[in-house]
Amino acid sequence: MNRVISLVLTDDSVYLDSLTDRVQDELTTPLSMAAGVLEENGDITDLVKAVGVVRAAADLVRSELPEELRDMIDALRFQGR
């Protein structure tokens, strides 16, 4: 999850800005929520929920995701983190 957050929610927003508006709309809030859980050292239940929300949001825009991001999110399905 850290890799996905680091890729998309960087300080300079270059990667985020390169995504379609729809992808940005679907992923920004779930990724921000997941980042908050990680930053606050939230419990595993909160992290699993956050990952689930990110995966569900990504599924809505799967065809618009860059391959690298899609692969990273797909990997979350098997790792759970």
Image (tube, helix red, strand yellow):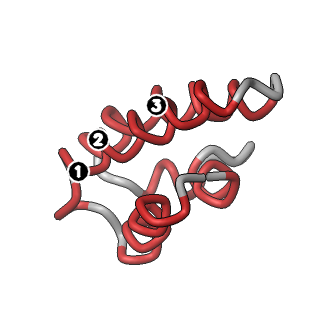
Q: What is the x, y in percent for residue 37?
A: 69, 27
Circles 2 and 1: CB atoms closer than 8 Å: yes
Residue 49: percent from left, percent from top: 48, 30
* Mark 2 secondary-structure assignment: helix
Label 1, label 3: how many angstroms apart (C-alpha)?
12 Å
- Name the kind of residue labelled 1 in the image: Asp
Q: Quadrant of residue 46?
A: top right
Residue 64 versus residue 67 in the image, above or below: above
User: Which residue corresponds to mark 1?
Assistant: 59
Q: Position of residue 76 (x, y in %)?
A: 49, 59
Q: Residue at x 55, y 63 (%)?
A: 79
* Residue depicted at x 66% and y 60%: 3
Q: In screen coordinates, is 74 left or right of 58?
A: right
Question: Would you place residue 25 above or below residue 61 in this image?
Answer: above
So how many labels did they put on this image?
3
Circles 2, 3 touching at the beta carbon (< 8 Å): yes
- How far apart, in angstroms, are the residues tagged by discs 2 and 1? 5 Å
Where residue 33 appears, as percent x and y from the top left, is 57, 25
Look at 51% across and 32% down and name the residue there: 50
Q: Alpha-carbon neighbours of circle 2 within 10 Å: few (<14), some, or many (≥20)? A: some
Residue 76 tag number: none
Q: Which mark is residue 56?
A: 2
Left or right of 62 on screen, residue 9: right
Q: Label 3: which residue? A: 30
- Of the numbered discs 2 and 3, the one sitting upstream in the chain is 3
